[in-house]
Amino acid sequence: MSDIKLQSKTPDGPLSEKWTRHKAAIKVVSPANKRKLEIIIIGTGLGGASAAASLGELGYNVKIFCISDSPRRAHSIAAQGGINAAKNYQNDNDSVYRLFYDTIKGGDYRSREANVYRLAEVSRNIIDQCVAQGVPFARDYGGMLDNRSFGGAQVSRTFYARGQTGQQLLLGAYAALNRQIAKGSVKSYTRHEMLDLVMIDGKAKGIIARNLVTGEIERHGAHAVVIASGGYGNVFFLSTNAMNSNCSAAMQCYRRGAYFANPCFAQIHPTCIPVHGDQQSKLTLMSESLRNDGRIWVPKKIEDVEKLRKKEIKPSQIPEEERDYYLERRYPAFGNLVPRDVASRAAKERCDAGYGVNETGLAVFLDFSSAIQRLGEKVISERYGNLFQMYEKITDVNPYKEPMTIYPAIHYTMGGIWVDYNLMTTIPGLYAIGEANFSDHGGNRLGASALMQGLADGYFVLPYTIGDYLASQIQVPKTDTNHEAFVEAEKQVREKIDRIFNIKGKQPVDALHKKLGQIMWNYVGMARNEDGLKKALELIKELRKEFWSDVYVPGENSEFNQELEKAVRLADFIETGNLMALDALNRRESCGGHFREEMQTEDGETRRDDENFMYVSAWEYKGKEHDPELHKEPLVYETVHLSTRNYKD
Amino acid sequence: MKFKLKIWRQKNAKTKGQFETYNIENVSPDTSFLEMLDILNDKLIKEGKAPVSFDHDCREGICGMCSLYINGRAHGPDDEVTTCQLHMRKFKDGDTITVEPWRSAAFPVIKDLVVDRYAFDKILQAGGFISVNTGGVPDGNTIPVSKENADESMDAAACIGCGACVATCKNGSAMLFVAARVSSLAKLPQGKIEGAKRAKAMVAKMDELGFGGCTNTQACEAECPKAISISHIARLNREFLCAKIQE
Amino acid sequence: MSNIFCSTIGKKLIMSISGLFLVTFLLLHLSLNLTALVSKEAYKTVCDFMDTNIFIQIMVPVLALGFAVHILYSIIITLRNMKARPIGYSVSNRTEASSWASKNMFVLGAIVLCFLALHLSHFWAKMQLQHFIGGHGKEAYSLLIELFKNWYYCVLYIVWVIALYFHISHGFWSAFQTIGANNSKWIPRLQCAAKIYAIIVSLGFISIPVYFFFGLYTV
């Protein structure tokens, strides 16, 4: 099934030359014309901030929107471990091809070859750019950049700044953005939320935004709109995402006709602090880098498990030979550094078998004792000091003395708005970058690759590819925000807000959101099956009804109203959850983060079905009353030889 | 655990605010402070009352969004944490807990406990960057940076821009915030080039926005969730004074 | 450097330099005072020297200027800092965060200033000033005996010196911090040095009234 709208526009030629050739072929906009063009960017994380800064430097007029009080609060800031780049500084035979191959393989062959190769190619420039911006990457004693290794890779290519790499990279991009704001080429709208995309003649021409302080509904026009609003992990309520992370901007685009791709691909991160009770608001991630030196285990004997749960013994009292280092046992070649989806499922397998080590039975150990013995406490504290401190603050357990307890949690969403090679969505003039799009990570993202993708898109891809479209817009005057499309969109937004206020039901937004999270975690979580997914669709339908008839939002629109913000976002989460379940039901194969119980090997590994599912599923919105329509973009592998992912030998 | 909460309520920037008292029960000691406020809000909403507005986002101590002045201390009674990392086990059962917004002329209250910290953005816009465009930069390893300098730069760069330094300083001074940025860049060869210009521009902006001056009380350092040292303030002073004298 | 002193840091630089100047003066003043513990003659010799030496004559107005500038800028800075927080906190619990002295420098300074005025009227006005205006100063040593006879004057004097102790224990290292001559290693060292300096100066000054009040002198 080939679809007229789903043209990936992947350039011809050998894989390693596609990007170079493409850059040479696409149009550019002259400096004089750039000054006349306006671009709106939604979100100021790594993707949004780097894109806004770069486009501002080029001379475009950029408007950025973020829901926080400052661009620096975007959730990219919470990324801990690092950023991959094929620099081969360690002389361990890394290369662009190897990074590309690891990423494709890590993604379980569900990403677009050309996009991933480009990502690996520009990864090298990102490090140079960040160093020039003053990002204080870790250095060795000779003054050179230091690297660590990460899951899914057998080379050391991860650059890091203590356990705060995301923060440092974001501060770099944010600084570049600030420079443009000071120059006037970028205008910053903080505490503003996009509530609709405005289209004129089939092209993206602006947005409707709500000023979160005053409640004013504003119209903003542009020649192009870029969505950099991150992923939809908060569908699950409990996730490692920030509390305000949401997918509303993406869902507005979806509703206006942008296809939504691979929604079922969500990543469960194996190393999060386990849930402690029902009042919990979010899950805290412990960086994957901990798996460099930490060893994951559960007791071999069920009696030990019971004693642990009753707190009769401490984990450190269980002798070495009574411990089951199950990752090392099952995957000798990669051991504790298998990709995230594999590590998560292995933890679930042990816990389902009854070996979970805390009261809830949903936790495994991450142990540093052998690393501390080998390297000393000082080295470990230098590497992970802030993470250990954070762990102790939250759990009141000292990880230098006793192992950490961890359990998988929703962390990242590989799916997102469908984009072509130029990062343009199915709506002309609408782009999606970073986690908000779907293109680079396939069924599973490798650690330290999210930062890489966000910055690659923002610094080195979008600034080129957006020119190809904008070159056709140089004659188009400034968008008139009095156009009827704006009037209509604004009216719809106001109606939606009024409708939410007028429900005046009984349930607070969070209560409903928790219900959605429960449905998603139980049926669309780490392991999925046909019956469960069908059940989930039913339950989501009921929840949708419940939301629209029983939610209670206090206060009014014309004020700072966090409950209203949450309610508007929840309405979109419900739709996203529905889309995820639909997509998961459709994809009858196990692949990356998507595990269909019907499709597994005898020893519980994923079983892909390349014959029937080697495509990107792209969903088209068909109105409230109808199910979305599935479109398929076939994935063509010209270079990579498909194989079963094997981390055993 | 149960608590009596005295919380600052203010409808918006224009109205006057006042304290309201609430009682809360059945709070687990493992609950974080913000989760405790979530529980309170859930209760308030169910009672048909307006929930307490407060800023929060990542809830893991890195975004710098949360900003509460709890029992007379920025980010509450624990060291090196943000409010979101503060847990109720740090309080005694039955305690009265007073919660106030950051107080500073430069941080006006938006609602309840939410303040406007855009002043920090303005300071950084004035010069908290290295003027380098995307592309056309040398390889990352071209200029070696000693581990010592990289580490010290990182110490300063750990600032999360939460504003606890301003909130806690008796002078409402933003010196630690400004110093963290200036110092972080000054420790790197890439940042040295514009060092003088940066220090002057950022200090001028800080003064213009109505922050107080530093009197070296060290309160900022003690309350900084990232324990940023006032030695960075000394470096800022040095950078600024040298820059001014050379003018 | 045209507008250096318009900035908050520039204003603090003035405080810092004038403060260090005054701190140096204190040490000089103390060493002169301590001669009174040696003998009446020794004290008389230095008093005569102070009254007649041309360098000292020049330094007196400079010193006065130092005081004036230090006081004036402390007022300017304090007023500005008060404006930075128009609404205060209802609960404040920063006791551990910073030293008591550092938070009360203005008050401490004001106490020092009040006693300074008293001190000037009691000693300086009757001694050095008389020489400057051509009169005859009171015999210095007997002035000491006379004033420190009164227990209340001694108490006032000691209170003053204690205030001075706190003022210096913060001001001394703080001055280096403001100039920028500081780093993470030197902050604790200078803080320690400030304490030692403040102890030496205050013990030195206190020794004088104690010496005279308890009549340890021989005439």
Image: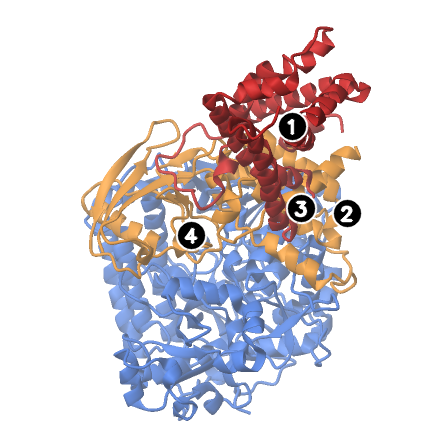
SS label for mark 3: loop
10 Å crowding of disc 3: few (<14), some (14-19), many (20+): many
- The chain carrying label 2 is B
Where residue A47 sits, quadrant-wise, is bottom right
- The chain carrying label 1 is C
From mark 2 to mark 4, how far is it between C-alphas? 35 Å
From mark 4 to mark 3, how far is it between C-alphas? 36 Å
Where residue A284 sits, quadrant-wise, is bottom left
Position of residue B239 in the picture relative to residue A410 (left or right) = right
Task: State the hue of chain A.
Answer: blue
Position of residue B67 in the picture relative to residue A449 (left or right) = left
**Residue carrying label 2:** B193
Q: Nearer the viewer, mark 2 or mark 3?
A: 3
Could you tell me residue A492's position as x and y percent?
37, 42
From mark 2 to mark 3, how far is it between C-alphas? 22 Å
* Mark 2 vs 4, N-terminal side: 4
- The chain carrying label 3 is C
SS label for mark 4: loop
**C16 or B170: nearer the viewer:** C16
Q: Give the residue type at disc 2.
A: Ile
Colour scheme in the image? by chain
- The reply to whether dot 4 and dot 3 touch (C-beta < 8 Å) is no
**Residue carrying label 1:** C36
Q: Give the residue type at disc 4.
A: Asp
From mark 2 to mark 1, how far is it between C-alphas? 57 Å
Marks 4, 3 in one chain:
no
Relative vertical location of residue A330 with respect to residue A639 in this rendering, above or below: below
Q: Give the residue type at disc 1.
A: Ala
